[in-house]
Amino acid sequence: MTPKMMVAPPRINLRRAASYNNSQQQQHQHQHQHQHQQQQQQQQQQRQQQQHDAGGPLSATSRFGFEHVVFLASSPPPSPSLPRPRGRRTWSRAGARARTKKRRVRRVLCSGGVVLLALWIVARLFCRSGGSLADGPRPLLSHHRKPDPNYVDVDEAERAGLLPSAGAGAGAGAGAGAGTEQRSGHFVGLDVAAAAEKPVCTSSLTVLLESSDAGLGRSLLMLWMLYALAAEQQRAFFVDDSRWAYGRYGDLLQPPPLPACRPPPRHEMVPCPAQARHLVVSASTASDVLLEGGHGGEGSTRRLLGLAGVGYRRLFALVEDDAGYVERRVRQLRERAGGAPVVGLHIRRGDRHPFEFQYRDTYIPIEVFADRARGLVEAHYNETRTTKGGEAVTVLASDDPTVLHGQSDLSDAVLAQQRIRLASGAEEQPSKTRTSPDPRFMHRFTDEGHGWEGGFFSLVFWNLGAQRKNNAIPQDDDEAGGPPSDQTLRLRGFVARAYMMDLAVLAGASDKVVCAVSAMGCRLLAVMMGWERAFEQGGG
């Protein structure tokens, strides 16, 4: 009888990972099959032994056993390099719900943290843009305004021996008698001989008219607000114009009212803190002094405007000749208009550009001013429902003398004042020099006249009356350390007088004013007209 050979099926693959994940039931079946196969092998060996004993013919291969090639079809032999197969983990429903709840909590915390971070970033950006500076309490500013208990005034420190005494020679500064040492500085309207008999002021505020800004409007606004602050704090008010770029204060405006005391010694005047008995303020420290005085925070715009209005009514007094001209000019404009409205236009050019994004690199077109003026006139007639009287009058004030050239929209406009006019280069040239010379012959060089084309520029202002041959030198006389010449101060004085007369005529004669808020002159007009007239009644 030929022995049977069991061949392993071809589907056996020792590298299949699924063969190592058999269940316990399959293992028991494999063991049972293995025992059955062992019994069959034993029976086969017994039959072969019987045939051998009987002497039957056998082939050479019949003596070789094939039991070592018998494999289990469903279970490969274990590999010594692989770990023992792990059973499948089973989870209970309670554990699954707990894991789901944990995942939800983590998701909520992560999403909530992202939302809070975004809100915090937006809030920080909003605070930096200044949108929330006028809302809510200000404990830091309130604490900052409190007086410092550790501060000691200079005269108290001298009496207490904390500071050495300045001596009798330095006793009264510019307000001392004739026998004292001459000090630097010049107090506006102060008679040194008469002030020597007066007592030293208990407290004072001295405004130093010194600024790197060529414009006059900022100095005027600062002066008006500080005067009102000094009156509010019951301080004596003084003005020092020794370093003012426009020359003497008395050449432009009438001196401020003098108190019944004289200024303190120079060494007792300090720039800070604001609680000092004798305070000296310049353009660099004016904002800090106003903040320390309580004029800041929520609703500060109207308070500062009212503060400046107090100073305007007491300090804005033109010199006698200019004041008389302004009064006559205002009366002429009102008589010309009759019952019709007078609309003032303040057009700023030069180095001042509007705040509007579309005009940030240029200027507001003349058409915009003209359209706004016509709209105000129509609104006036619609409100009053009357057409009696003369025609509406448009009054123009500008730092550019060429603003009316070729402008059909402003053909009927009149200048605010013609006492001092800023001439252009074309107006300065005489008619005979405007002809082209014969190019075939040599001619004497004639310097071209320069005017105020384009408006007010700070570089042009600082170089008024400059006498130097090297035009490449950038600094002017003030920046070089030397005082400006008399001719320079005279030219600057003309510019300042023209500027102030323009504002005075516009504020006195106009029912409505159209201007750009980026210009300091527009803000001064709001102060001169008052809050109600400029904003609430639609005057500007």
Image (tube, rainbow, N blue to C red):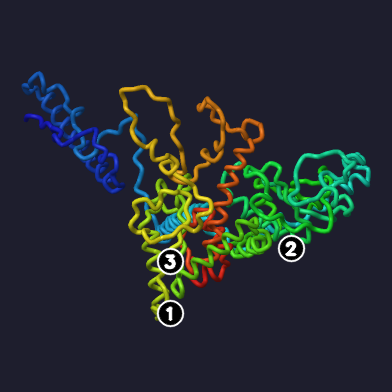
- Residue at the spot 41% in from the left edge and 73% down from the top edge: 390
Q: Residues within 10 Å of mark 1 (few under 14, many from 20)?
A: few
Q: Give the residue number, with chain letter if any, for mark 2.
A: 232
- Mark 2 residue type: Glu
Q: Quadrant of residue 528?
A: bottom right
Residue 384's mark?
1
Q: Mark 1 and mark 3 in contact? Answer it, CB < 8 Å.
A: no
**Callout 2–callout 1 Cβ contact below 8 Å:** no
Q: Is residue 465 left or right of residue 512?
A: right
| Label 3, label 2: how far apart the Cα atoms are | 40 Å
Q: Residues within 10 Å of mark 3 (few under 14, many from 20)?
A: many
| Mark 1 vs mark 3, CA separation in Å | 17 Å
* Mark 2: few/some/many CA within 10 Å (<14, 14-19, 20+): few
Q: Which residue in the rendered view is the most extreme toward the bottom? A: 385
Q: Quadrant of residue 254?
A: bottom right
Q: Residue 331, how many percent across, how many down?
A: 53, 67
Numbered label attached to residue 393: 3
Q: Residue furthest front?
A: 432
Q: CA distance from mark 2 to mark 1?
A: 41 Å
Q: Which circle's residue, 2 or 1, is located before the other in the chain? A: 2
Q: Nearer the viewer, residue 292 or 371?
A: 371
Query: Which is more toward the observer, 457 or 30?
Result: 457
Question: Circle 1 — which element?
Answer: helix
- Choose between 470 and 104: the one closer to the eye: 470
Q: Nearer the viewer, mark 2 or mark 1?
A: 1
Q: Which mark is residue 414?
A: none
The reply to whether discs 3 and 2 touch (Cβ–Cβ < 8 Å) is: no
Q: Amino acid at mark 1?
A: Thr
